[in-house]
Image (cartoon, rainbow, N blue to C red):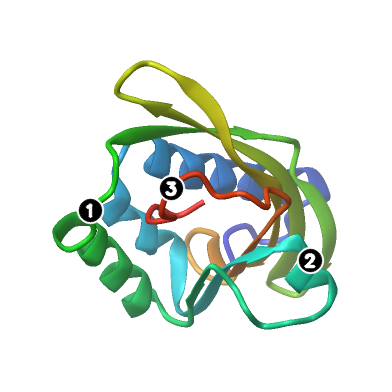
Amino acid sequence: MLLESPTRYELQQLVTELNALYAELIDDDRLEEWPDLFVSDCVYTVIARENFDRQMDTSAIYCDSRGMLVDRIVSLRKANIFPVHAYRHILGPTRMVSTTGALAKTQTNYAVLMTRTDGRTTIYNSGKYIDEIDLSGERPLFRSKIAVFDTNLIDTMMVRPI
C-alpha cells in the first residue's frame, strides 16, 4: 500500500489528487497518459442517470480494460471526426464513501465545460463520478470509474473521456 497506515485525511488527499490529475490530463489533451490512471482490468463507464438508476447497462461509453481505454484514444486521434473543442472540468470535493483494505470507494460531482474554436463556452456534461480506487500499489489507480451524467442532450459526439 502507498502508506503504511494512512489516515482518512491522507487517503482523502490521495484520491482527490488522482481525480484532479484525471481531469487535468483530459483538459490539457494529454489523453495518451489518461489510461495510466487505471489498473489493467479496470472498468470505465459513462452512463445516463436514468439508465444508472434503473440498473440498465446501456451506456454512452463502456470499456472493461486499460487496453480498451488505449484503443479509444487511438480511435479519437486517427478515426473520429468531430468539431475542434476543449474541455475544462470543474470538480466538487471528493467524498470518501468507504474504505476496505486497499480499496477506496468515492464520489465526486463534476461539470465539464466545452469551448469551441469560436470562443463560445457551454456546459457540455454534468453529473457525478462513482469510483473504486485501488490503493495497493505505489500510487492510487482507478479500478472502476463510472461517470453518471445528468445531461440528457449531448451537443456533439462524445469522443473524449468525461
State the image coordinates of residue 89 (x, y, percent, origin top left).
Answer: 54, 35
Identify residue for label 3. Answer: 156
Q: CA distance from mark 3 to mark 2?
A: 20 Å
- In the rendered image, the vertical position of residue 66 relative to residue 81, given as above or below: below
Residue situated furthest left in the rendering = 78
- The kind of residue on which mark 1 rests is Ile
Identify residue for label 1. Answer: 81
Q: Residue shown at 75%/37% (left/top)? A: 93
Q: Residue shown at 27%/72% (left/top)? A: 71
- The kind of residue on which mark 2 rests is Glu
Instruction: Give the crowd class for mark 2: few <14, some 14-19, many >=20 residues within 10 Å.
Output: few
Apparent side of residue 122 relative to residue 58 in the rendered image (left or right):
left
- In the rendered image, the vertical position of residue 62 relative to residue 129, given as above or below: below
Identify residue for label 2. Answer: 50
Q: Residue shown at 46%/67% (left/top)? A: 38
Report whether residue 135 is seen. Answer: no
Residue situated furthest top in the rendering = 119
Q: Residue shown at 23%/59% (left/top)? A: 80
State the image coordinates of residue 77 (x, y, percent, origin top left).
Answer: 19, 55
Q: CA distance from mark 3 to mark 1?
A: 11 Å
